[in-house]
Image (cartoon, rainbow, N blue to C red):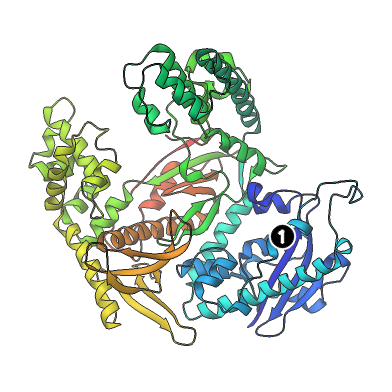
């Protein structure tokens, strides 16, 4: 089969960073300026569409030809933009080199991937691109000097335009060079199809309630003005939003605070405070509510049909293969606790600030809780929402062979009570509301949620153990009891670590627990990875691994990744518990992926999914039970793994 590598340069007045690809390409002034391409390893050609050059007939034919594989870096962009511009090219014929890199554990971004993968300088993305994109691809400010134009055209800077064409050519070279270095580590065909499903879902989009969004933005503006006015009256400060001014004012009123960070303010509000200081801190807390930005993000990203597109990034978390959120960031939407969501929505749509204030008190918090409900189904449809119940606890017990946990999930499913029973040797029948033993359930719950990946007391604290009323002194005992109650899960951590270390030391595959650890290398380009083959057949990749002592003086696996804090390509280390977490979450992700395929096979439209939850824009005759049954069907590659779904239906999205 022929391979056609492509890169395009485009223009649009829509900010792609804020509104996303799909809204960007739907702009009336969207246009493809340059089309660079190469066949297999041939020379790069460029078509200057901005200056009226025409696409060659052969290229036009090959864009539709199923025997020609189209490659691009972030191919969703090229595929969607070309189709928007009238060049028909089916998605099934495209492959994405960015996704290939993410699958192999690399970062996103053509330049960043080129550096991480070790491309020589002549095959790297040119660094001049950002300035050229700003000049030719985004509107310019009209001035007297530039003749009041709003676009810079090739004729306005011929030398820059030639450089821009070279930049476009170089992107094709860089993409091709990255692809060559990854070809020895192919993306499974099933994952290619899953990527295509994700692009179709993103292109379909999800409808938003524009009336609710407008109301929320208006009510928030009114709330902000009133709160700022009240803060000025209480404090007498010119700018009560200033942390320095407000902190100084608080100190003068006899209250000690080190800072005005969210957690510090919340903690201080639990103390006895002067009324004026308390109210000033409450206002500070309400004004600091950032979730209103999600309404703004929706408003910017929605198209003329009130649909927001591009909410998920396939393989956004490349340690597990899970999807990541984009634009509105669906993965961290605020929860809703208001019982009368319908009425609260009506008040916001009516822009009734006084009514919201009277009924709910905290206006910013009310708007925050309603964010989920801004997502609505298509006309004549409903949302069917379902998620896997306790999937990580189920997967780790299945993987480790922790028999008693598997039996719990096969029967009554009360994992928190059963865990407490195992930990404290109390009959599970006694751990019910009304009995003193019921207090043990809280310990069983936090232990189940926090300790599955070799965590200790700090993991319990991070999971909120202290907020649940547990004391720091009793945490080590909870850790000890949980590990004794789950010996096979405990053994799994150490077995995973030993298998990974053995694979590194011997360069031989190590098979344990239906997993295969291996070191895979490509001697031509020097690429090497520690891989973990999952039960589904998919692999996790740890790039450029090596053995070295960690900060505890213990031999550990180190590899390269993007640092969560620095966002730079750097070395990190791992251990048995952390690798177990990667593996368990990756298996849970594969369960979701299989469910998405099953839903797709029934002709139903998933509009987005978050963690282990799917949201379907469904015809009225679709039932929750139907979707939950799909989730419970055994995974063909995981015999004995007991899964269960739970869900609800609604005319807007919410946390049930």
- Residue 171 position within the rendered picture, expressed as x and y whole percent measured from the top left: 66, 71
The quarter in which the C terminus is drawn is top left
Instruction: Name the quadrant containing residue 440.
Output: top left
The one of 253 and 77 positioned closer to us in this rendering: 253
- Residue 574 position within the rendered picture, expressed as x and y whole percent measured from the top left: 31, 63
Left-right relation of 289 to 169: left
Residue 635 appears in view: yes
Left-right relation of 558 to 43: left
- Residue 310 position within the rendered picture, expressed as x and y whole percent measured from the top left: 60, 51
The one of 451 and 221 positioned closer to us in this rendering: 221
Instruction: Name the quadrant containing residue 247.
Output: top left
Name the residue: 26% across, 56% down.
396
Left-right relation of 430 to 126: left
Name the residue: 46% across, 57% down.
598
Above or below: residue 365 compared with residue 514: above
- Residue 570 position within the rendered picture, expressed as x and y whole percent measured from the top left: 43, 65
Mark 1 crowdedness (10 Å alpha carbons): few <14, some 14-19, many ≥20: few
Name the residue: 40% across, 16% down.
253
Total marks shown come to 1
Instruction: Name the quadrant containing residue 380.
Output: top right
Above or below: residue 282 compared with residue 652: above
The one of 204 and 12 positioned closer to us in this rendering: 12
Name the residue: 52% across, 41% down.
621
Q: Which residue lies furthest to the left in this view?
A: 425
The quarter in which the N terminus is drawn is bottom right
Residue 378 appears in view: no
Dot 1: element: helix
Q: Residue furthest bottom?
A: 524
The one of 196 and 234 positioned closer to us in this rendering: 234
Q: Name the residue under label 1.
A: 131
Left-right relation of 404 to 357: left
């Amino acid at each position: 089969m022929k391979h056609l590598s492509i890169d395009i340069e485009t223009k649009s007045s829509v900010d792609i960073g804020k509104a996303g690809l799909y809204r960007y390409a739907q702009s009336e002034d969207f246009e493809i300026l340059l089309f660079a391409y190469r066949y297999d390893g041939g020379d790069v050609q460029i078509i200057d569409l901005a200056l009226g050059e025409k696409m060659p007939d052969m290229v036009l034919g090959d864009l539709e030809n199923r025997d020609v594989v189209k490659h691009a870096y972030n191919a969703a962009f090229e595929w969607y933009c070309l189709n928007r511009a009238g060049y028909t090219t089916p998605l099934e014929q495209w492959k994405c080199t960015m996704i290939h890199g993410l699958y192999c554990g690399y970062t996103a971004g053509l330049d960043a991937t080129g550096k991480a993968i070790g491309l020589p300088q002549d095959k790297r993305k040119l660094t001049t691109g950002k300035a050229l994109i700003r000049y030719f691809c985004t509107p310019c400010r009209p001035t007297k000097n530039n003749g009041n134009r709003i676009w810079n055209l090739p004729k306005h800077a011929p030398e820059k335009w030639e450089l821009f064409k070279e930049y476009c050519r170089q992107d094709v070279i860089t993409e091709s060079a990255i692809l060559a270095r990854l070809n020895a580590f192919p993306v499974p065909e099933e994952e290619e199809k899953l990527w295509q499903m994700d692009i179709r879902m993103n292109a379909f989009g999800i409808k938003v309630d524009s009336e609710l969004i407008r109301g929320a933005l208006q009510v928030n503006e009114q709330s902000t003005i009133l709160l700022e006015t009240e803060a000025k009256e209480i404090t007498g400060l010119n700018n009560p939003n200033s942390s320095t001014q407000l902190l100084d004012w608080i100190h003068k009123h006899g209250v000690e605070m080190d800072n005005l960070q969210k957690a510090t303010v919340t903690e201080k509000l639990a103390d006895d405070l002067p009324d004026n200081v308390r109210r000033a801190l409450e206002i500070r807390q309400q004004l600091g509510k950032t979730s209103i930005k999600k309404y703004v993000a929706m408003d910017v990203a929605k198209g003329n049909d009130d649909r927001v597109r591009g909410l998920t990034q396939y393989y956004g978390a490349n340690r597990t293969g899970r999807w990541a959120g984009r634009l509105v960031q669906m993965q961290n939407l605020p929860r809703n606790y208001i019982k009368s969501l319908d009425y609260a929505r009506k008040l916001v749509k009516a822009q009734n600030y006084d009514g919201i204030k009277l009924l709910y008190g905290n206006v910013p918090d009310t708007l925050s809780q309603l964010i989920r409900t801004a997502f609505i189904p298509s006309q004549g449809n409903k949302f069917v929402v379902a998620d896997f119940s306790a999937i990580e606890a189920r997967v780790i017990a299945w993987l480790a062979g922790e028999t008693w946990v598997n039996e719990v999930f096969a029967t009554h499913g009360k994992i928190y009570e059963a865990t407490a029973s195992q930990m404290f040797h109390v009959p599970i029948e006694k751990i019910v509301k009304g009995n003193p033993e019921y207090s043990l359930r809280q310990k069983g719950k936090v232990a189940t949620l926090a300790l599955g990946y070799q965590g200790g007391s700090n993991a319990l604290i991070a999971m909120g153990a202290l907020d649940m009323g547990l004391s720091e002194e009793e945490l080590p005992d909870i850790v000890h009891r949980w590990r004794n109650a789950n010996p096979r899960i405990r053994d799994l951590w150490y077995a995973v670590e030993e298998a990974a270390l053995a694979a590194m030391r011997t360069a031989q595959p190590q098979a344990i627990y239906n997993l295969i650890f291996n070191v895979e290398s490509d001697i031509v380009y020097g690429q090497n990875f520690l891989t973990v083959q999952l039960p589904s057949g998919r692999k996790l990749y740890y790039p450029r691994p090596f053995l070295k002592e960690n900060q505890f003086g213990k031999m550990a696996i180190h590899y390269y990744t993007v640092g969560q804090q620095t966002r730079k390509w750097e070395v990190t280390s791992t251990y048995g518990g952390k690798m177990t977490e990667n593996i368990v979450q990756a298996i849970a992700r594969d369960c979701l992926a299989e469910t998405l395929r099953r839903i797709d096979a029934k002709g139903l439209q998933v509009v987005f999914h978050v963690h282990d939850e799917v949201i379907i824009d469904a015809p009225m005759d679709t039932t929750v039970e139907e979707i939950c049954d799909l989730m419970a069907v055994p995974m063909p590659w995981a015999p004995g793994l007991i899964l269960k779904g739970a869900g609800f239906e609604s005319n807007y999205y919410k946390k049930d």
